[in-house]
């Protein structure tokens, strides 16, 4: 033994010395670390299985010459995967970050037509699953019907700018023509001679008459009745001069609003509402807007709501209470009340005359 120590050149450590304990601790530490790494590696490589549920979005990415006809909504799928625990954990984490949603680009694998595809094979192609090395053992539903149609391009489609809230003089749109992408199955019912697209309505309300509206980006809408159609470019620039807005008078009847508790207190059995003579329960209001919208308002005149809000202070008063007239116009017409106050109403609540004795 002395010969070996002499040959190695090492000085033997005194048993139970500080250096002897330090070397023993260091050797034990390395053994523990290597042992833990071996167990962790073994655990990661251990094969496991799990059922996973998600939402599958079938889509066609923009730029593809295809349109998706079905499925039209997300498909709820559940699938059974097999692989190491780390890969399954990675997949579940990715799904959680994506709101449990998987997206499949059908145009990458399929062409025009109606296809019945195995759900398990679709899932196995997705990078979220493929990159983890997991095996998709089974999936529900077993298959999906994917219907794709080829897109056809129609060029030189005129653009018509639409306006609301006022009249537009000398309207201009740049470019004046766009291209339309439609499904091949829709071509037979398109009249190319009358085909045009409209912009999203450009609101002129509040703009002073005579103002020059500089070119402004406005979205172009695909024609109604052509689902899935798209416009290229999707945005044009619209400019115009704000023209005179039409104005029209309407005679409306004034109603009154009361707190809900009044019915319970039976106030109306004792009192009736009176207007200050020669006051009337009608007012003339002026409404401003597009001529076409004002014509539509005439047909919906009964929907104009004019009212005052009653207060308990008016009950039994000898003087007259003054109330502001509030007006609500029918929704969806994009018209507005012309500036200027509406003459208020003077009223009071008077005791009803006693019923004549029978």
Image (tube, rainbow, N blue to C red):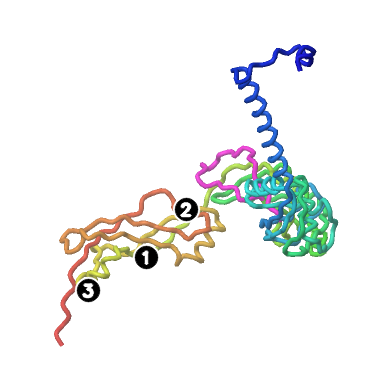
| Of 298 and 67, the residue lying toward us | 67
Whichever of callouts 2 and 1 sits on the residue coming sooner in the sequence is 1
Residue 253 - label = 1
Relative side of 10 to 207, left or right: right
Mark 1 and mark 3: span between their CA atoms?
23 Å
Q: Residue 262 in the image: x percent, y percent?
A: 26, 67
Q: Which residue is under mark 3?
A: 269
Q: Secondary structure at mark 2?
A: strand
Is residue 153 among what the camera can see?
A: no
In the image, farthest residue toward the bottom = 358
* 212 magenta-colored: yes
Q: Residue 139 in the image: x percent, y percent?
A: 74, 61
Relative side of 327 to 264, left or right: right
Q: Which residue is under mark 2?
A: 336
Which residue is at 29% across, 58% downward? Answer: 345
Q: Residue 236 in the image: x percent, y percent?
A: 69, 43
Whichever of callouts 1 and 3 sits on the residue coming sooner in the sequence is 1
């Amino acid at each position: 033994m002395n010969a070996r120590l002499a040959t190695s050149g090492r000085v033997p450590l005194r048993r139970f010395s500080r250096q002897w304990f330090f070397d023993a601790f260091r050797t034990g530490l390395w053994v523990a670390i290597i042992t833990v790494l071996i167990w962790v590696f073994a655990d990661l490589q251990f094969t496991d299985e799990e059922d996973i549920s998600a939402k599958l979005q079938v889509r066609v990415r923009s730029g593809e010459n295809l349109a998706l006809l079905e499925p039209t909504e997300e498909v709820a799928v559940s699938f059974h995967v097999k692989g190491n625990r780390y890969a399954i954990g990675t997949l579940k984490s990715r799904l959680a970050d994506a709101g449990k949603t998987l997206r499949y680009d059908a145009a990458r694998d399929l062409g025009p037509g109606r296809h019945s595809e195995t759900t398990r094979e679709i899932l196995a192609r997705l990078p979220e699953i493929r990159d983890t090395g997991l095996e998709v053992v089974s999936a529900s539903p077993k298959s999906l019907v994917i219907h794709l149609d080829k897109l056809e391009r129609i060029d030189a489609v005129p653009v018509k700018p639409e306006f609301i809230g006022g009249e537009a003089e000398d309207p201009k749109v740049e470019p004046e023509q766009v291209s339309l992408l439609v499904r091949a199955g829709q071509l037979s019912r398109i009249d190319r001679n009358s085909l045009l697209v409209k912009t999203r309505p450009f609101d002129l309300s509040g703009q002073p008459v005579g103002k020059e509206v500089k070119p402004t980006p406005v979205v172009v809408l695909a024609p109604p009745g052509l689902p899935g159609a798209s416009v290229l470019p999707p945005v044009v620039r619209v400019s115009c001069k704000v023209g005179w807005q039409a104005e029209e008078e309407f005679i409306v009847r004034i109603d009154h609003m009361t707190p809900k508790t009044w019915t319970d207190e039976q106030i109306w059995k004792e009192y009736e509402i009176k207007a200050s003579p020669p006051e009337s329960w009608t007012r003339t209001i002026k409404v401003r807007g597009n001529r076409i919208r004002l014509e539509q308002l005439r047909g919906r005149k009964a929907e104009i709501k004019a009212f005052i809000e009653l207060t308990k202070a008016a009950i039994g008063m000898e003087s007259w209470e003054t109330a502001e007239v509030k007006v609500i116009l029918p929704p969806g017409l994009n018209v507005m009340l012309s500036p200027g106050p509406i003459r208020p109403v003077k009223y009071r609540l008077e005791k009803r005359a006693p019923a004549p004795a029978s």
